[in-house]
Image (cartoon, rainbow, N blue to C red):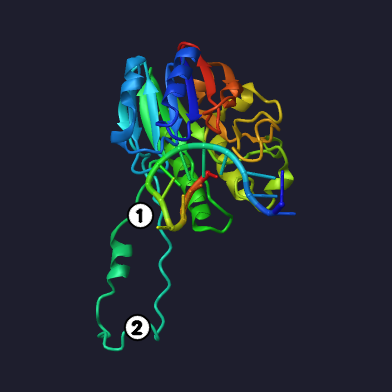
Amino acid sequence: MRLATWNVNSVRARVDRVVAFLERSGTDVLAIQETKCRDEQFPVAAFEAAGYEVAHVGHSAWNGVAIASRVGIADVEPAFPGQPGFAKPAAPAPSDADAPAEAPADAPDESQATLLDVPPPVEARALGATCGGVRVWSLYVPHGRAVGDPHYAYKLAWLEALRAAAAGWLADDPQAQVALVGDWNVIPLDSDVYDPGAFVGHTHVTPAERAAFAAFADAGYTEVTREHLPAEHTYTYWDYQQLAFPRNKGLRIDFAYTSPAVRRRVTGVVIDRDERKGKGASDHVPVILDLADPA
DNA sequence: ATGGTAGAATCTCTA
């Protein structure tokens, strides 16, 4: 079975390219990130015409994750258990000068009540489905924006919650076939970035992010793309700006953590670097795993 | 020349 993951940066803008990739590569299951559309906007027909079923979760023009499969798609979950939402920081309390003088002192504070009563919205960043016997999770880890930004704490909490869920799946069944694939928005090693100096003080490289990423190994998972492609400066993403791709100023941020039962089946990994070429490319390229039949 | 790209809810946000 051929299992791939690809942050496509808008599935509507790139549907022809994505379907062409599926057909050219012979991919059976594709985990897609950054679809940038709502469910009803997803171009399902083009995938179905090529022989793939699609599961998708998307709430807006941001985020959005999907799985396309030609080997079945079952038990779809639009989030992982315990997936945190992003809570906007509370607005600063109005000063005395701003408060209306006639407001009764015991008036209920509705904004505070809303913050307490409504859980933060869970973003469309994780979708699970069982395809060809493998529990596949298409993951779009929060970017973090900047160290110290509320989105940075959210990113760390999101990764830790995913790790806890994934550890639970293996505890329930040590033989479980699980693949956690996608855009992790973490640069695990200095050799995964064109110039570590360019990321000093930036997200993606902080010890906390790297520890959150490495914790999946402690939970029993193996990052099989590095296992099969250990060469330094093997990138999966090149920024659109500043001629990053022609200059090969890339990042390695798309990975596949697998359970032991899947790890044993991996016979090869390919990063489809050529997919970054030409007009209309995503800024990420597909990462492809070949899996032998289960023992 | 102090930007530079791309996609989307485009008098601007996100990456």
Crowd band around label 1 with a 10 angstrom C-alpha radius: few (<14), some (14–19), many (20+) = few
Q: Nearer the viewer, residue A43 or A195?
A: A43
Q: Earlier in the sequence, mark 2 or mark 1?
A: 2
Say which residue label 1 marks: A120
- Residue A256 or A200: which is nearer the viewer? A200
- Asked where in the image residue A12 lies, by quadrant, the reply is top left
Residue placed furthest toward the bottom: A101
> In screen coordinates, is A184 left or right of A189?
left
Mark 2 vs mark 1: in front: 2
- In the rendered view, does A130 fall on the left or right side of A195? left
Q: CA distance from mark 2 to mark 1?
A: 27 Å
Is residue A261 visible to us here? Answer: no
Let me know if residue A78 appears in the view. Answer: yes
Residue A94 badge: none
Q: Check disc 2 and give the amino acid type.
A: Ala
Indicate the chain on which mark 1 is placed. Answer: A
Query: What residue do we see at 38% from left, 17% from top?
Result: A132
Q: Are marks 2 and 1 on the same chain?
A: yes
